[in-house]
Each structure stands twice: as C-alpha cells, then as structure tokens.
C-alpha cells in the first residue's frame, strides 16, 4: 500500500509509527502519470508482520 503524504515531517512521523509497530516501510519518490513533478510516498508491506510471527 502506498500513502502519498506531502509534508516531509508527516512522512517521517508515519514511517516511525509504522516501523515501531513491526511493519516494513519504505520511503520513495515517483512521477505520477500526467504530472511534471515527482510525488513522495510511504510504502507499507502489510504482511511482513504476519510472516515474522
């Protein structure tokens, strides 16, 4: 699941909360179709927590 969050401080907060709760998270940038700018996102791997148990 990708979460598109505009503010860098908010992205950092989401990464920290999810990471501390055992989720695998990644931060990245990608160009969205039809847009000239790139968008930052937080990607969450949902079943990484289930595999660890």
Image: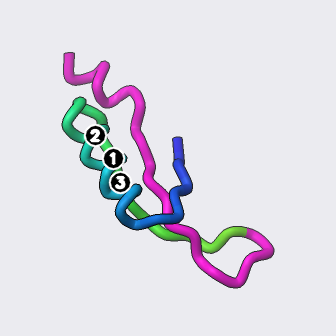
Q: Secondary structure at mark 1?
A: strand
**Residue at x-position 74% and y-position 77%:** 35
**Residue at x-position 53% and y-position 64%:** 6
Q: Secondary structure at mark 3?
A: strand
Disc sitting over residue 25 in the figure: 1
**Residue behind mark 3:** 26
Looking at the image, what colour scheme do you see?
Answer: rainbow
Disc sitting over residue 17 in the figure: 2
Q: Mark 1 or mark 2: name the one nearer the start of the chain.
A: 2
Instruction: Report, in whole angstroms, how far the alpha carbon at label 3 lies from the one at label 1.
Output: 4 Å
Q: Is residue 46 above or below residue 34?
A: above
Q: Is residue 12 left or right of residue 22?
A: right
User: Residue 32 in the image: x percent, y percent?
Assistant: 68, 69
Region of the chain picked out in magenta, as a range: 33-53
Within the magenta stretch, is there residue 43? yes
Location of residue 21 by image quarter: top left
- Mark 1 Cα shell of 10 Å, populated few (<14), some (14-19), many (≥20): some
User: Residue 49 in the image: x percent, y percent?
Assistant: 28, 25
Within the magenta stretch, is there residue 5? no
Q: Is residue 52 left or right of residue 34?
A: left
Location of residue 12 by image quarter: bottom left
Q: Are marks 3 and 1 in contact (CB under 8 Å)?
A: yes
């Amino acid at each position: 699941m990708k979460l598109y969050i505009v503010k860098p401080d908010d992205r950092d907060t989401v990464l920290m909360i999810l990471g501390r709760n055992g989720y695998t998270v990644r931060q990245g940038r990608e160009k969205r179709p039809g847009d000239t700018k790139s968008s930052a996102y937080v990607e969450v791997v949902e079943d990484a927590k289930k595999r660890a148990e």
